Image (cartoon, helix red, strand yellow):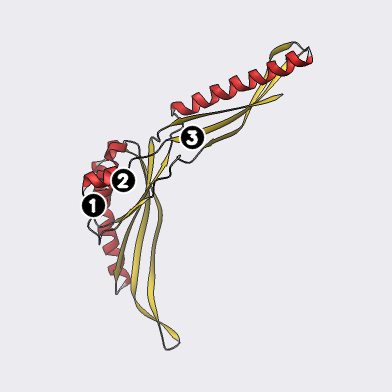
Amino acid sequence: MVRGTGEARALPDLASLRVEVTADHKSQDEAYDARADLAAKVDVVFSEHASAIARTTVASLWVQPRTRWHRGEDIRTGWRASRTTFVDVVVLDALGVIMSDVVAAGASVTGPNWSMASTNIAYDLARRAAAEDARHRAISYSETLGLSLGDVAWVAEPGLRSGTPSVTPSPVAMRAEMAPPPETELLEDLTPSEMTVEVSVEVGFRIS
């Protein structure tokens, strides 16, 4: 049994965003209704860019009281309602526009977090490199030990992971109360770096 390792580099093809809508009001119902209105506007943005978005997942919905400390006790000052959604963008050219439109709709957005889809060619390239390394190691051992290398008996992939970019870009945080930068500047900030896929494979060869 030998273990081979391999890696490949490629640009990420998936960007994940965290989109949050938050509303503050004096009453619980007002906060809930205001959040629902903001969420509806953000959902319109998601619909308009549906061809560029692979998935939207609502991660949390909550309404909670707001308080302040006054003379040794908490005094309720109002209510806050929020919704957090994770968005997977697969058409990266549309990423800057999506982020700007979400902010214009009244939400805050944090990201992107870069990753690779499981169908990225880098995974296959890394697997091929690992398999070649495993066979090379097996041949080296068998020739040195005077053995005859036979067929492959089994294969296992104990290690597969996507590494971080060689230069990690700083996530961009945008909020509704702040004017977003010009689109050209935003897109420049969103240029991803290459990521590394690392693979290890265990191969059992028959010997004689």
Tell me which amino acid carries mark 1.
Pro
Identify residue for label 3.
196
Q: Considering only vertical position in the picture, is 151 above or below 187?
A: above
Q: Secondary structure at mark 1?
A: loop
Q: Earlier in the sequence, mark 1 or mark 3?
A: 1
Query: Is any part of residue 189 visible from this angle?
Result: yes
| Kind of residue indicated by mark 2 | Asp
Numbered label attached to residue 88: none
Tag 2 near tag 1, CB within 8 Å: yes
Q: Circle 2 is placed at which residue position? A: 189
Examine the image and state in which quarter residue 152 appears: top right
For mark 2, does the 10 Å Cα neighbourhood hold few (<14), some (14 to 19), or many (20 or more) residues?
Answer: some
| Residue 38 x %, y % | 26, 58
Q: Nearer the viewer, residue 158 or 137?
A: 137
Marks 1 and 3 sit apart, C-alpha to C-alpha, by: 30 Å
When the figure is inspected, residue 4 is found, relative to residue 175, above or below; the finding is above
Task: Give the mark nearest the N terminus, 2 or 1.
Answer: 1
Amino acid under label 3? Thr
100 w.r.t. 157: above or below:
below
What's the distance in space between the residues labelled 2 and 1, CA to CA?
A: 10 Å
Specify whether residue 46 is in view: no
**Residue 55 position by quadrant:** top left
Q: Quadrant of the C terminus?
A: top right
Q: Which residue is mark 1?
A: 181
Q: Residue at x 30, y 73 (%)?
A: 27
